[in-house]
Amino acid sequence: MLGPVILAASRSDRIRRLISAAPVTKQVVDRFIPGERVDDIVPVIRELTGRGLDVTMDVVGEDITRPEQAAAARDAYLELIDRLKELELGERAEMSVKLSLFGQALDGGHELALANVRPVVEAAAAIGTTVTLDAEDHTTLDSTFAIHDELRRDFPQTGCVIQAYLFRTEADARRLAENGSRVRLVKGAYKEPADVAFQQKAEIDKAYVRVLKILMDGEGYPMIGSHDPRLISIAQELAHRAGRKLDEYEFQMLYGIRGDEHLRLAAEGHRMRVYTAYGTDWYGYFMRRLAEKPANLRFFARSMVSK
Ligand code: FDA
């Protein structure tokens, strides 16, 4: 299992410096993060939506140390939403937000993150779209769900993410599978200890199916965040059995991963949303993508050697 090793190594400052400074890094990063500034990303949004795909936009960054950085992240989202206004995509272009980037881990972080995310949710609602709160490591989730509950009082369409690898997730899914609730189910991308999370792929996949069933049988709007072909066909089957129409759930995948599958599902009439990350602070996001697939790491290592 290379993934957990990569995730653990990615916390080292030495490795961060090494990877960030490598001359070939940029071209590999571009596969997953197609731009650094709003001006780079607007054409990407146009292209994806022009092909019949929807998007959820993520300004990359995490592990901030100062409240000013959180305010800058909030402003980056507000700038993006301002630009989205002119594209008139409504809910076809939504936002994904990591509360750690909004200050959640700082002193008084719960209140700070809520204060920073609220204007983003308001601005999104004003252009007819919404925000989904990403799930980060398990120690942050009680705070994230409390912020989600708080935001949903005024903006019930605010989404959240649950991670199949966590033992707590079936209970969270039951609580969240209610009318109007938008829930993205993913396997989980962080290195979590064995007392809170399944460690084996087979166990995580089984948990994913159990949780998906709860969401499909419930009253909410399930968002299937996975590239796994087996889970995608199980999701289609469960949706069919639950009597859901095509607009009563959606698929989501990451930009740069299984692009043909994005188009295939969209062509079948499914709503297919591409999670598109952009920005300069790409390190954490990029390392999780490397950890998910050893072949990515081999590709990266080969390009470093062949330069
Ligand atoms: P799995 O890892 O088993 O991959 C299935 C297949 O997909 C692989 O065989 C390969 O073909 C392809 N694939 C998957 N990952 C790849 C990669 N990095 N590079 C190349 N090919 C790859 N996690 C989290 O903890 N919190 C969150 O908020 C989110 N948000 C989120 C949004 C969306 C839209 C997606 C799709 C995923 C997330 N994730 C996430 C990440 C998620 O937890 C998980 O790590 C990845 O989706 C990989 O898991 P899969 O379900 O794709 O299966």
Image: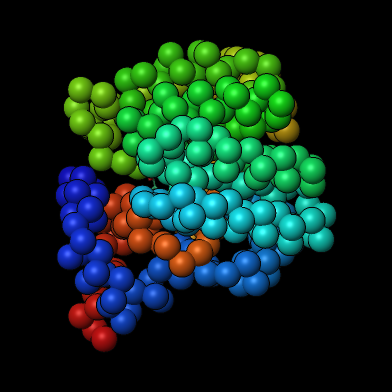
Q: Residue at x 31, y 61 (%)?
A: 296
Task: Identify the image quadrant of residue 207.
Answer: top left
Ligand 1's quadrant is: top left
Relative vertical location of residue 201 with respect to residue 55 in this rendering, above or below: above
Asked if residue 138 can be seen in this view, the reply is: yes
Quarter in which the C terminus is drawn = bottom left
Closer to the camera, 261 or 3?
Answer: 3
Q: Position of residue 256 (x, y in %)?
A: 48, 61
Residue at (68, 66) in percent of width and height: 42
- The relative height of residue 112 versus residue 221 in the rendered view (above or below) is below
The one nearer the camera, 198 or 139, is 139
Instruction: Look at 66% across and 58% down and name the residue there.
Output: 80
> Residue 249 at what x, y percent from top left?
65, 31
Tell me if residue 205 comes above or below residue 257 in the rendering. above
Question: Which quadrant, please, contains the N terminus?
Answer: top left
Q: Position of residue 27 (x, y in %)?
A: 41, 76
Asked whether residue 184 is in view, the answer is no
Tell me: 146 left or right of 140: right
